[in-house]
Image (cartoon, grey):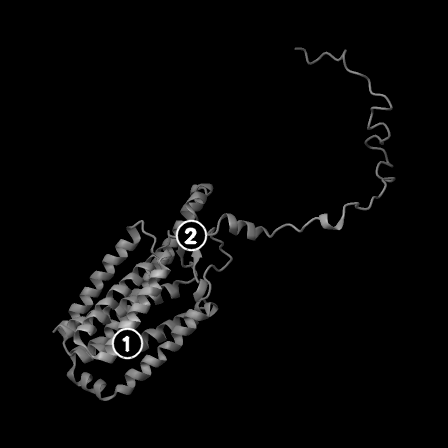
Amino acid sequence: MNYNNHDDQQPLNASNNPYQNQHQYGHPDQYAQQPQYDPQYSPQYQAQPAPNQMHIQNQIQPNHQQMNQPMYQPPTSDMKPNTPPQMREYMDEDDKEFMKEIRRGFIIKVYSILVFCLGFTALLCIGPTVSKSVQDYLESNIWILITAAILSFVPLCILMYFIKVARRVPLNYILLLSFVFFQSIVVAYACASVGNAELVLIAALMTGGLTLILTIFACTTKIDFTLCWGAVFVLAGTLLLFGIFSLIFRSQVLNIVYVSLGIIVYGFYLLIDTQLVCGGKTWQLSEEDYIIGALILYIDIIVLFLKILALLSKNR
């Protein structure tokens, strides 16, 4: 087939040449006499404004990490969804490695703060654990325990419900250390009430071992515990119910069941909070919320220690 044969082509004339009446390129009056036309379409077909580009991006990639935007919201929605597996293939290797490096730094920062807080609590509890005079002083001044327990809720509520404050340095560190200080006094009273340094040490070692096992399991398992919020509320309600019953009936067996259930519940909380910090699941904390990450892990570990200590003291 010959494409260079122009013998069959018809010449353009005035009736079939659509460009006959147009000016040639370069003519000075090329655009001078262009007629103006008003739009003739009906109002119901007016052009709609373009959708927000960020809204579309959030629909496509709900966890594409934006460095200039906060991801952590107040308690009802204080986590961001992780990148869906089907969307990770659209990220190149450099982006994936960059995001992993940021997450690694966040995890190191959270656990560094956590170790400092736990170490501070441990140091503050040494005196009430080993000194009989300190134990007697704390037991005769119960108002210190009540005051510390009430004051600990102030920085806790501020950090959990005012997210801008939780990200503001150095105010977030001051509030966290204030909470840790008051909570350490509560833990010191618990250690003093036991009056047995060996029992406190055993409880601390058991708590450390359980925390290590649950942390490794949360980081290596394929189970997504960040989706188990329904189970969280059920367990919390059950624990509250057992606590009320144990206060009413004053049963030794019921108290042991209550403490044992508390260990299970807060062990489950530790699994969820560890995955929120480490990431890689459906929900995770933002890299800006290292104070929140250290705070929730600290609470889980401290409550686990108190429950284990109570269980050991009841079975003594």
Residue at x-position 26% and y-position 54%: 216
Residue in the image at 79% along x and 46% along y = 39
User: Which quadrant of the figure contains the N terminus?
Assistant: top right
Viewer-closest of 311 and 279 = 311
The secondary element bearing badge 2 is classed as loop
Q: As rendered, which of 100 and 148 lies closer to the eye? A: 148
Q: Residue at x 39, y 77 (%)?
A: 154
Q: Report the amino acid beneath label 1.
A: Ile
Count of labels in the image: 2
Horizontal side, residue 285 vs residue 66: left or right? left
Residue 27 percent coordinates (x, y): 85, 33
- Amino acid type of the residue tagged 2 in the rendering: Asn
Q: CA distance from mark 1 to mark 2?
A: 38 Å
Q: Earlier in the sequence, mark 1 or mark 2?
A: 2
Query: Which image quadrant: the C terminus?
Result: bottom left
SS class, disc 1: helix
Viewer can see residue 57: yes
Number of the label disc, if any, that sits on residue 244: 1
Question: Quick check: can you spot residue 189?
Answer: no
Query: Residue 276 placed where, x, y %?
Result: 37, 58
- Whether the residues at callouts 1 and 2 have beta carbons within 8 Å, the answer is no
Q: Is residue 55 left or right of residue 116?
A: right
User: Is 14 rendered above or below residue 246?
Assistant: above
Image quadrant in which you'd find residue 292:
bottom left
Residue 153 percent location from the top left of the image: 37, 77
Q: Is residue 94 above or below residue 81?
A: above
Please determine whether, in this image, residue 17 is positioned above or below residue 285: above
Query: Is 35 situated left or right of 141 in this image?
Result: right
Mark 2, residue position: 82
